Amino acid sequence: MNPRLKDMEYAVRGEVPIRAEEIAAEMEACAASGQDHPFNFSSLLRCNIGNPQSVGQPPITYYRQVLSLVDSPSLLQKSSSWMFRRGTQIPSDVIERARSFSSSGSTGAYSHSQGLASVRRDVCDFIEARDGGPECDISNIFLLNGASAGITSVFTALLANPKDAVMVPVPQYPIYSALITLLGGKMIPYYLDEENDWGLSVEELQRAIGEARKKGQRPRALVMINPGNPTGQVLSEETLRMVARFCAKEKLLFLADEVYQENVYLPGSRFVSARKIAHELEQTSAGAERVELVSFHSTSKGLIGECGRRGGYMEFWNIDPQVHAQLYKLQSSQLCPNLDGQVMTGLMVRPPKPGEPSYRLFEEESSRIFGSLQRKAAALTARLNEVDGVTCNAAAGAMYAFPIELPRKAIEDAEAKGLAPDLMYCLSLLEATGIVTVPGTGFGQRPGQWHFRITFLPEEKDQARPRPRRLPRPPRGIRGEVRGLRPRGSYEARPRDRALHATASLGQAHQKPLSVGHRPHPSFRPQVWRADLVPHYACHALLGLPGAGGRAQRAPRLQECRPRQALILRRPSRAVQRPRGFLSGRHPPGGGCLVGAW
């Protein structure tokens, strides 16, 4: 095996997410077998990766409607008549857009190795409108299986021997360090200034490149991530101009990772592309400061959040034609980017226009997603800063916060156990709360500092509620014990219900049905759902009471209720005063039926 592959690390899917998958599997196995799991939470909150639709962000209707028609020509053929007659309303602009994609060929066929010409033309129009010019050439656009595929291609062409090196911001997105390790190059870290909102200075760039050259390394390129991942900063025009000048002076290829360009939240912050700055710099210097640039964009981020489609593009700017030809050859060896990703890229850069039938719904959905992200970014950083010992800069953009944490004693405990302190913190956070994060070690940080990355993508209702705690003990005088899987007492259950049942023998004359009186804390979410039926102390729902013939009547709304364990309430050996609100009403002779779940 390639030893560089063994050395490669990718923390976003590293030790903490692996442990999270083990916990999820254990919880699922316990639920299937009717046993209680040992964890102090009911579900995992996955804050480790920028995967919006996996944590509740809905897909935008327009994108999915067009894609469904493009992928199904038979539906597209009937869309104007058959669908409308049956009440399924597909807007006319969706049908027209799907037909325009279909005219380029089937999504099941290979396309041009750089991607569909029609989509690349739309990308050029998007770039020109965004930057106010200059003209974009579709031959410089490469459609991609996500931005990561383009970064891999460029690094493959760039890193020719072990002395070749790439300047990478620290903290950084781990794909850069991972690819550099895999391809046998060197990484030159330049540190972002946390005290200055993760800003950057030319002095730091000069320090980093000077030290690398003293070690015999050959700097070939500089990576810039804007807006920042994992740091969430949005770089100013002045900073971008400084970086572009530095690249022109040092003869470095400028690699601009701009996949979060739609994710800018703070008033006064705005995204400016490296391409626009490079063009202005060349114009004002009369060509003396000429920047070679490759910029990347993706369908996985922004408001579109279609990570699984693997769509995106890269644009070449001032790239030598011979280099262009070699990268085209490399791209051709992969045949072509996937067609659904190409369609999604086309939709991202050319959404519905004002006046078109789909525009109003598109704007409503996009505004709702953006507003939610903006609120969650502010709320997360505010709450992190309320925690003793934790400080976090505002998340001006992207999808993450990168707080600094850990007191000295925690660091000493971790070192005594042979663990990185931030890894130990993230693992303990996972075990205690079910929140999945990524230790800062995987992104890089200054020596002696310990961070973790956390996304603010989960739905607002999930972020707002505290993580569940174990249920308190039942009131004095009432004791519970877990029984087996089979129904007990007079209740006759259907096997498919998979509910655990119990009889409650409380020994009072029956006058009216039992009712649930004590409600749970609103933060409680049982692993097995129907949370609206979950009262306190594990009474999940009331099944019913014995009727004629001694059989209990099935509670209709229990059909979706699938508790894990039964709590059997027994009458104590001596008379006790029932806690107010625990169970109200009089009780049947011989017992009514309760279902319980912990």
Image: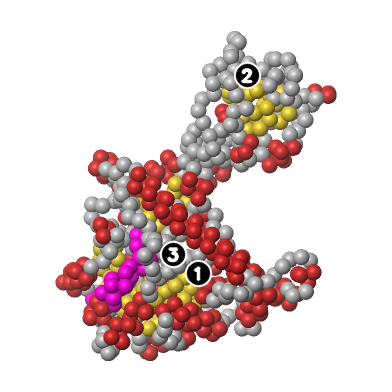
Residue drawn at x 39%, y 46% is 383
Residue 243 covered by magenta stretch: yes
**Above or below: residue 31 compared with residue 486:** below
Label 2 crowding class (10 Å Cα cut-off): few <14, some 14-19, many 20+?
some
Q: Earlier in the sequence, mark 2 or mark 1?
A: 1
Q: Tally the numbered discs.
A: 3
Amino acid beneath label 2 = Arg
Amino acid beneath label 1 = Thr
Residue drawn at x 63%, y 16% is 571
Amino acid beneath label 3 = Asn
In x, y percent, where is residue 528?
60, 40
Marks 3 and 1, how far apart in space?
12 Å
Residue marked by disc 1: 299
Residue marked by disc 2: 570
Residue drawn at x 36%, y 47% is 384
Residue marked by disc 3: 263
Residue drawn at x 37%, y 83% is 317
